[in-house]
Image (cartoon, rainbow, N blue to C red):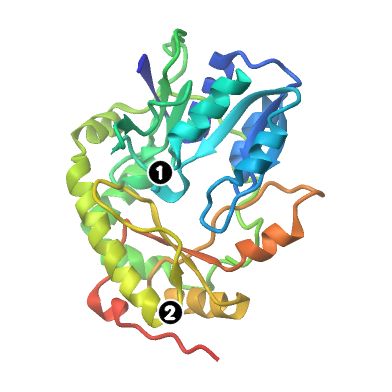
Amino acid sequence: MNNIKYLNNGRSALDLGIKILSIKKGSSILVPEIICDVAVEVIIKNRLNVVFYKLDNKFQPVWSDLYKKSLKNVSCILMVHFFGYPQNLKKFQKLAKKKKISLIEDNCHSLNIKYKGSTLGFTGDIGIDSPRKILNDLYSGGRLFINIKKNYNIKNFKKYKPSLFIKIKNRVKNQFPNLIKKIKFIGNRPNYESPYLYTGKDKNFLIEQMDEISKNNLKKTNLKKESIKRIKIFKKINAFAKKNQIKSVFKIYKNLVPMHFVGLAKNQNHVKKIFDWGWKNNIEILSWPSFYKSKNLNKHLIKKWRKYICIPLNQNFDLKNANGKISIK
């Protein structure tokens, strides 16, 4: 691994990474069909075309489709370790090498953990992550891992400066988590059933450096402890899921630092009941992603997407919630 750039968020890391790769304008990047609108906006901003490749029900590539779409005017593949569960790195490397194209490794749903002899983010030509999404004590945080013989001086970028309001909010959130939780769930729940719930809200962003407080807190993070904590929460949620006919999409195992528990519901009515239960019981249960708006968005894909529910693993999920029962009719 060549070097690391500490930036304000994951999309800044992706934007700068694309620039460092010097991808030919007008060429295409292969992107998984389930991806947040922000990633697509960054790619389009850099005057590149997006070509979506298919995923199966476990968020793994349909490799025949990926190989087929890697034939013409393609300069790069974006692979994603969805929700912090590692993809098959070697197969992506093999494809990139065979087609002589760049590989971007998106690890924004996890941290730099060891997996089968590799460190997530250190395998692609560039890797990105977004620790501010994973850890509660960061104001900013996106890292760019440069794994090729290229460098970039980021000293010209300003450092992110959290406002006084954000600092106070963060301190209160860490000291009084139950109070903040109750406040958060007052009012109507967001329309998680919408595939465009947060689309377009991050269009205008600046590449900045990570603030020093967040950088120091990140360096102090004990990945082993974070993994143990999340695995315990995953197991509790999985017990709850089994009682409520929610099928876990991923398996949990040692050293993972996943962002979400991801479940597959029976149908869309079942999903609505799960969202309603979470909101009523102060448990965050949401959908992911908010898609980029496009006339060509696959209706079959959206229908499949509507059955997934995501439960963040950075929240308390006690035995009462684990034993919770959702009425399914």
Residue beneath disc 1? 86
Distance between the Cα atoms at labels 1 and 2?
Answer: 32 Å
Label number found at residue 280:
2
Position of residue 280 relative to residue 69, above or below, is below
Which dot, 1 or 2, sits closer to the camera? 1
Which residue is at a point 71% across and 36% down the rendered structure image? 68
Relative to 4, residue 186 above or below: below
Residue sticking out furthest to the right? 295
The answer to whether residue 289 is visible is: yes
Amino acid type, mark 1: Pro
Is residue 281 rendered to the left or right of residue 137? right
| Quarter of the rendering occupied by the C terminus | bottom right
Quarter that holds the N terminus: top left
Where is residue 14 drawn, in percent x and y? 53, 28
Name the residue nearer the viewer: 158 or 325.
325
Q: Residue at x 72, y 61 (%)?
A: 300
Helix, strand or loop status at disc 1: loop
Q: Earlier in the sequence, mark 1 or mark 2?
A: 1
